[in-house]
Amino acid sequence: MKIEMTSSGSVTTIALSGRFDSSVVPEFRQMIDTLPTEQPVNYVIDLAEVQYIDSGGLGCLVAFLRRVRQAGGDIKVATLTDKVRAVFELTRLHRIFEIYDNSTAAERSFASN
Amino acid sequence: MEEIRLTISATLVQAQLGTIAAAEIAKAYYRQVEGADQQLASTFADAVELAVGEACTNSVKYCPAAQAESCMVLICFELGARELVVRVKDCNPPFDPASAPIPDFEKVPEGGYGIHIMKECMDQVSYERVDGWNVVTLRKSIPEEE
């Protein structure tokens, strides 16, 4: 899986591509551990290029969400394919994460909060 | 009854490859049975991919660490007239997925979704212990056209 991060103002967008499954959990958790927690940071996770997500990938996102919310920030999710959205719905996580059609809309939503 | 067997090492990387192979087999099987409806074949294959992926990941996760290199996971496909049966076999300590509790969605757990996903994606998920092997059987039918 490829992980690309871009920051604009107070929002950091993390674009993932490839298969977000249990085999990449260590890499993703390592990435989370390097992110700042001293102050609130808002994140957009862009899943446009993620072809597959399993329970391991979802667990990473939940762990990340907990960590970010504890620091006073939030995570919004953008650009889910139908296949990935179906897994969010199966696991009820579409009720936990705010989901947007694209990362620009997700980034703007932070400004309107 | 046609059967295809894959043998993978008990590693997450090999589990990923086994899962991709399962998706391709499911898609090709659907097309053989029903013709070339790309969308329906993909929907069928996506469900099989998820369920087999979770089953394989469990086989790898519960493999005793000392044996990980030598431990094998078997993925066996039975291609029935209108039913695909996938058996994921490992020689880990006995583990019945049916005994796993349904995740408490209100508490938003970080784990425990895998078996729920398997059950939701397939028509039937069953478990048996056979000659020292855990055998998780995943069944999915192609409905008859009305």
Image (cartoon, coloured by chain):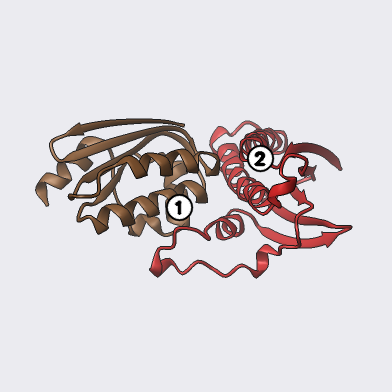
Chain colours: A brown, B red
1 and 2 marks in contact (CB < 8 Å): no
Q: Viewer-proximal residue, A53 or A7? A: A7
x and y percentages locating residue A34 in the rendered image: 33, 40
> Which subunit holds the residue at mark 2?
B
What x and y, as percent, mark residue A30?
41, 41
Residue situated furthest front in the rendering: B66
* Image position of B39 (left or right of B69): left
Kind of residue sitting beneath label 1: Gly
Q: Name the spot of residue B44 as percent of width and height, x first.
A: 60, 43
User: In front: B42, or A40?
Assistant: A40
Apparent side of residue B126 relative to residue A86 in the rendered image (left or right) = right
Q: Is residue B84 visible?
A: no
Q: Quadrant of residue A80?
A: top left
B2 relative position to A79: left or right: right
Query: Helix or strand or loop: what does disc 2 sit on?
Result: loop
Report the residue marked by disc 2. Answer: B11
Q: Nearer the viewer, mark 1 or mark 2?
A: 2
- Number of labels in the image equals 2
Q: How far across and down, in percent of the image, does residue B116 sit? A: 56, 60
Task: Say if residue B49 shows up in the picture.
Answer: yes
Residue at image coords 23%, 55%: A71
Residues indicated by labels 1 and 2 sit on the same polypeptide chain = no
Can you tell which mark lies on residue A59? 1
When asked about the image quadrant of residue B49, the answer is: top right
Q: Which residue is at a point 43% across and 49% down the rendered structure image?
A: A60
